[in-house]
Image (cartoon, coloured by chain):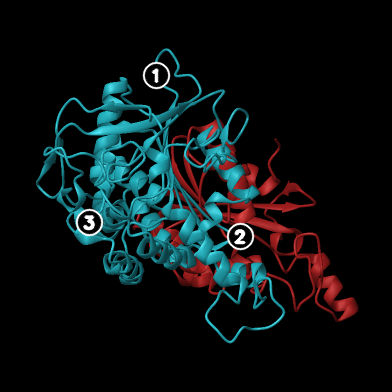
C-alpha cells in the first residue's frame, strides 16, 4: 500500500452524507475519478464506465499506481471503440476501494483508519455515490453507462435504480445476482485474508498488511477469471525453470509460479479490507430480490433505455445462462435489448482482452 | 440497400409504426428497412453470433438466440408483427415455431422455399437425387433445411390449425409471379397470417 499513498488522486467530496442500503450513512465521502475527452457544452456526451472488483478509475492512459497502461486502454481513447474524441469518459473508483475513494483504509471520524468500522456497502451504494458525483459535476443524463463483471452489476443496478440517468446500458460478462458458487469463491478469499495473522481484525494499518492472505484470495479469484482451455494453452503441465519435478513444494509448475506472482503483485496495489468489503457487496447483489423478487420488476422504469448485454462462451464465473435471465426480464418489459454470446478463449477475463468482435459490438452500440 | 424480393414484399406490408420481431434476422437488413422506412420498433433474434454482432454494430436491437427454444421467452402478444423468413424449413418443430410466432405476434409473415417448384420436381425425377438449388443449397446430410415443405402442404397445415391467410405472394427467379399454379411455378412463397 505504500505505493498508493504518495499519489494525489483527483477526487471530489460529496456535499451530503451518503445513505447506504444497510441503513447507515457515510459522511464526507471522497470519490476519486478520472475523465478522458471533453464534455460537450450541453453535457450530453458523457459515458460513465464502472470498474470491476479490483479495478480503478484509470481506464486509459498510464496508471500512476502501477505505471502500466489503463485497464481498458484497448477500448477507450481517441478513435477507439469508446471514442474520447466524441465522448467524455468518466470513471470513478468505487466506494469501499482504496484508490482515492472512501473505503476501509480511509481515515474515519476518530482520526484512525476505519478498518472494520467501515459500513458494509452494496453495489447500489457504489452506484449511488457515483450518481451523487454526477450531480456535483452537473451531468444529469449520461449517453451510456458501461461495465464488465462488477462494473456490469453497477450498470444493471444503475438501470434499475436510476433509469432516468442514462440512455444506454452496456453490461458485459456479468450477472443480475451472485450464485452460491460465486459467493463460495469469495468466502474462500475472505477467510484466507482473515486467517492471516497480520490481519488483526482489520486493524493493521500501523503495521504489516495481511499480504499473504490477500495473495491467496487473489490467486483463488484469478482462477475463476480464466478458462480451463486458456490455462491449458498458456501453461499446460509445463515446469517452471527446471527440467524435472523437485519432489517438494516449490512452484514446480508454471501455473503455480504465475498464480503466486499474480497474488503477490496484487498486494502491492490493493488493500485487504477493501477486498473484504467489495466482495461482500458483490455477494449481496441480487437485483431481483432488491425489487420484490421478480427481475423484470427491477427494469420497469428502464423500458425506454437501450440495453446491450454481452457474455463469453468460456466464462464460467458469470455465464451466458445468467445473462439470458437478464435478457428475459428485459423482454418482459419490452425494453430494447441486444444480447450476444461472443466466442473467446480467455474465460471471464475476455472482456479485458483482445476480442475484436467485442470492439465492434461496443463501438456500434455506443455510437 | 436493396432487399431480397421476399423481404421487400414483407416490408411493404408491415403497417408503419408496428412493433416487429424478426426471427432469424441475420445482420438486420429487413429490420433496418422497417425502422428507417416505416418507423417500426424492430427487434431481432438470430442464432449466429457474428451476424448478431454485425446487427448490434448497426445500432439494431438483436438478441442472440435459437428460435426453436428462445421464442418461448417472449410474452404473449409482445409484438404487432412477427416475421420468419426462410427459416421455417430449418426448424426442429415448424408446427411449434408457427404457434409461437402467432402467440408473440398478433400477425405473422412467413416465407419459405417451395419444394414443389417444377425445377425441383424435375431434378428429382431425372436424377433420382435430392435437388440442390439456389434457395436450398447443401447436400442432404449437411443441409440446415431439415423440413422441406411445399405450398400445398403449408396451405393444408394452416387450414388444419385455423390460421387465417391475410395475403400470399409468390416468387420465381427473384421476381414476383401470379398465384396461378403457384405450387408448380413458385420458387418461394410469402404468407401473411393471423389467428
Quadrant including the N terminus of chain B = top right
Q: Is residue A293 left or right of residue A239?
A: left
- Write down which chain is painted cyan: A
Q: Which residue is mark 1?
A: A43
Please name whichever residue, A361 or A354, is drawn nearer the observer in this view of the structure: A354
Q: Quadrant of residue B92?
A: bottom right
Asked if residue A334 shows in the view, the reply is no
Give the secondary structure at mark 1: loop
Please name whichever residue, A37 or B177, is drawn nearer the observer in this view of the structure: A37
Real-space Cα distance between discs 3 and 1?
42 Å
User: Pointer 1 indicates a residue of which chain?
Assistant: A
Residues marked 3 and 2, same chain: yes
Q: Earlier in the sequence, mark 1 or mark 2?
A: 1
Rendering colour (chain B): red
Q: Residue furthest top?
A: A41
Asked if residue A340 shows in the view, the reply is yes
CB atoms at circles 3 and 2 under 8 Å apart?
A: no
Q: Is residue A228 above or below residue A4?
A: below
Numbered badge on residue A202: 3
Q: Residue at x 51, y 37 (%)?
A: A63
Amino acid at each position: 500500500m505504500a505505493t498508493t499513498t504518495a499519489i494525489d488522486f483527483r477526487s471530489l467530496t460529496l456535499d451530503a452524507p451518503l445513505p447506504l442500503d444497510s441503513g447507515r450513512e457515510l459522511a464526507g465521502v471522497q470519490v476519486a475519478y478520472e475523465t478522458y475527452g471533453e464534455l460537450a457544452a450541453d453535457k450530453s456526451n458523457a459515458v460513465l464506465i464502472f470498474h470491476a472488483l479490483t479495478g480503478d478509475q484509470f481506464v486509459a492512459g498510464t496508471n500512476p499506481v502501477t505505471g502500466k497502461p489503463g485497464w481498458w486502454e484497448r477500448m477507450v481513447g481517441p478513435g477507439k471503440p469508446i471514442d474520447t474524441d466524441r465522448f467524455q469518459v468518466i470513471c470513478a473508483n468505487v466506494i469501499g476501494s482504496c484508490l482515492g475513494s472512501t473505503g476501509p483504509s480511509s481515515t474515519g471520524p476518530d482520526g484512525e483508519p476505519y478498518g472494520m468500522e467501515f459500513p458494509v456497502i452494496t453495489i447500489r451504494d457504489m452506484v449511488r455515490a457515483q450518481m451523487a458525483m454526477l450531480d456535483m459535476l452537473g451531468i444529469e443524463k449520461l449517453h451510456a453507462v458501461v461495465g464488465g463483471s462488477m462494473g456490469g452489476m453497477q450498470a444493471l443496478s444503475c438501470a434499475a435504480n436510476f433509469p432516468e440517468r442514462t440512455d444506454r446500458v452496456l453490461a458485459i460478462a456479468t450477472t443480475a445476482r451472485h450464485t452460491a458458487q460465486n459467493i463460495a469463491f469469495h468466502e474462500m478469499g475472505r477467510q484466507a485474508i482473515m486467517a492471516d495473522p497480520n490481519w488483526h481484525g482489520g486493524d493493521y494499518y500501523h503495521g504489516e498488511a495481511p499480504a499473504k492472505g490477500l495473495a491467496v484470495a487473489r490467486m483463488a479469484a484469478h482462477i475463476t477469471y480464466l478458462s480451463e482451455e486458456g490455462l491449458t494453452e498458456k501453461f499446460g503441465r509445463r515446469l517452471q525453470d527446471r527440467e524435472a519435478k523437485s519432489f517438494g513444494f516449490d512452484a514446480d509448475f508454471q501455473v503455480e509460479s504465475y498464480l503466486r506472482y499474480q497474488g503477490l503483485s496484487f498486494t502491492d496495489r490493493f488493500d485487504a479490507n477493501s477486498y473484504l468489503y467489495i466482495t461482500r457487496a458483490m455477494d449481496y447483489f441480487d437485483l431481483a430480490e432488491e425489487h420484490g423478487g421478480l427481475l423484470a420488476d427491477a427494469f420497469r422504469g428502464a423500458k425506454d433505455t437501450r440495453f446491450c448485454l454481452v457474455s463469453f462462451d468460456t466464462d464460467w464465473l458469470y455465464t451466458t445462462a445468467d445473462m439470458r435471465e437478464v435478457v428475459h426480464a428485459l423482454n418482459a418489459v419490452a425494453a430494447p435489448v441486444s444480447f450476444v454470446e461472443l466466442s473467446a478463449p480467455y474465460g471471464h477475463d475476455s472482456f479485458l482482452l483482445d476480442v475484436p468482435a467485442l470492439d465492434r459490438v461496443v463501438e456500434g452500440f455506443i455510437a | 440497400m436493396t432487399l431480397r424480393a421476399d423481404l421487400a414484399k414483407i416490408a411493404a406490408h408491415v403497417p408503419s409504426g408496428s412493433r416487429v420481431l424478426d426471427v432469424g434476422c441475420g445482420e438486420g437488413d429487413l429490420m433496418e428497412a422497417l425502422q428507417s422506412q416505416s418507423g417500426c420498433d424492430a427487434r431481432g433474434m438470430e442464432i449466429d453470433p457474428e451476424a448478431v454482432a454485425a446487427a448490434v454494430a448497426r445500432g439494431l436491437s438483436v438478441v442472440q438466440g435459437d428460435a426453436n427454444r428462445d421464442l418461448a421467452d417472449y410474452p404473449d402478444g409482445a409484438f404487432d408483427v412477427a416475421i420468419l423468413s426462410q427459416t421455417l424449413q430449418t426448424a426442429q418443430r415448424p408446427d411449434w415455431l408457427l404457434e409461437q410466432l402467432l402467440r408473440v405476434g398478433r400477425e405473422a409473415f412467413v416465407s419459405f422455399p417451395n419444394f414443389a417448384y417444377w425445377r425441383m420436381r424435375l431434378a428429382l425425377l431425372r436424377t433420382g437425387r435430392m435437388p440442390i438449388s439456389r434457395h436450398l443449397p447443401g447436400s442432404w446430410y449437411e443441409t440446415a433445411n431439415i423440413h422441406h415443405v411445399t405450398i400445398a402442404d403449408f396451405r393444408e397445415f394452416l387450414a388444419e390449425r385455423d390460421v387465417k391467410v391475410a395475403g400470399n405472394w409468390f416468387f420465381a427467379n427473384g421476381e414476383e409471379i401470379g398465384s396461378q399454379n403457384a405450387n408448380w411455378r413458385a420458387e418461394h412463397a410469402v404468407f401473411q397470417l393471423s389467428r
